[in-house]
Image: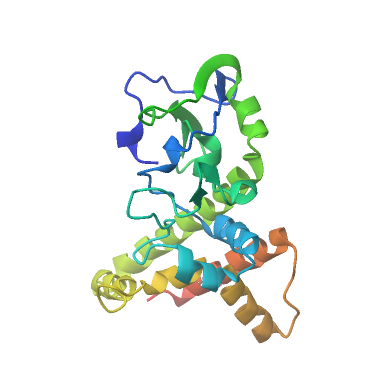
């Protein structure tokens, strides 16, 4: 979460902190935001649109990062007449608004209130708790998935640090891989967001059927990313 979006007077909150919010569906919070989507969220959104994750990435994500496309007027691509067209499968950032969520490398979770959208009609209060608000928004499955992907991210980062210590040329090679050929093209690392593509390839290699359940797809996807990105310690250069 971008710290620039945090309300300066907002204290650090936890799940037991007093908080409530009543959305008025004005749609103003759906403008001028960069909404990041992790593989689980992309999978849910793709199924909402009856697409594969690869098709969704090509159609609805920005070219240079895992962010939902926005229209020329700054509105989210999925905003229709001040209503969210993918509301049942909206990303975690939309579910937690007007809170931002942070999880550090040790898994410590905190929340803070974000700056209000101009002329927003939602009402903030303290009649409940952060956790009750999250439960009302159906955020817990999204947070669980985000935690799983963050854990694999930190493992990839640690593996890269081990490799870099033994290979002085790797940082430049890594930048070349991520850049993937220049402007207007998706970075190669974006392929890791394609749950359907990666799981299908893994199942083909193992001669097994592709699962249908989302939890199974996510588990196999994480295993595939780990296998691709984290070499065994004995195989590091």
In front: 234, or 21?
21
Q: Is residue 175 above or below residue 152?
A: below
- Would you identify the image quadrant in which residue 143 lies? top right
Q: Is residue 163 visible?
A: yes
Q: Is residue 235 above or below residue 94?
A: below
Quadrant of image for the N terminus: top left
- Would you identify the image quadrant in which residue 200 lies? bottom right
Count of number-bearing discs: 0
Coordinates of residue 222 in the picture (x, y in percent): 59, 64
- Would you identify the image quadrant in which residue 195 lies? bottom right
Coordinates of residue 172 in the picture (x, y in percent): 23, 72
Identify the residue at image location x=38%, y=62%. Answer: 62
**Colouring of the image:** rainbow
Identify the residue at image location x=31%, y=71%. Answer: 174
Coordinates of residue 50 in the picture (x, y in percent): 64, 67
Name the side, left or right, on which 200 lies relative to 38: right
Coordinates of residue 95 in the picture (x, y in percent): 56, 39
Identify the residue at image location x=53%, y=16%. Answer: 125
Quadrant of image for the C terminus: bottom left
Q: Is residue 120 above or below residue 145?
A: above
In front: 212, or 189?
212
Furthest residue toward front: 81
């Amino acid at each position: 979460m971008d710290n620039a979006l945090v309300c300066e007077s907002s204290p650090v909150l936890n799940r037991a902190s007093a908080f409530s919010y009543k959305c008025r569906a004005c749609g103003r919070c759906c403008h001028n935001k960069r909404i990041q989507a992790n593989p689980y969220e992309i999978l849910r959104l793709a199924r909402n649109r009856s697409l594969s994750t690869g098709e969704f990435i090509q159609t609805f994500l920005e070219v240079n990062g895992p962010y939902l496309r926005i229209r020329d007027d700054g509105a989210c691509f999925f905003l229709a007449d001040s209503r969210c067209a993918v509301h049942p499968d909206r990303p975690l950032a939309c579910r937690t608004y007007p809170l931002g969520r942070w999880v550090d490398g040790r898994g410590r979770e905190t929340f803070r209130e974000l700056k209000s959208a101009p002329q927003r009609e939602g009402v903030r209060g303290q009649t409940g708790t952060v956790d009750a608000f999250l439960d009302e928004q159906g955020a817990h499955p999204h947070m669980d998935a985000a935690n799983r992907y963050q854990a694999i991210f930190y493992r990839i980062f640690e593996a890269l640090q081990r490799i870099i210590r033994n290979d002085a040329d790797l940082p430049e090679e890594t930048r070349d891989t991520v850049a993937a050929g220049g402007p207007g093209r998706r970075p190669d690392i974006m392929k890791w967001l394609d749950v359907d593509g990666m799981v299908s390839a893994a199942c083909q290699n193992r001669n097994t059927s592709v699962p249908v359940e989302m939890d199974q797809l996510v588990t196999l996807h994480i295993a595939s990313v780990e296998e691709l990105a984290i070499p065994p310690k004995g195989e590091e250069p």
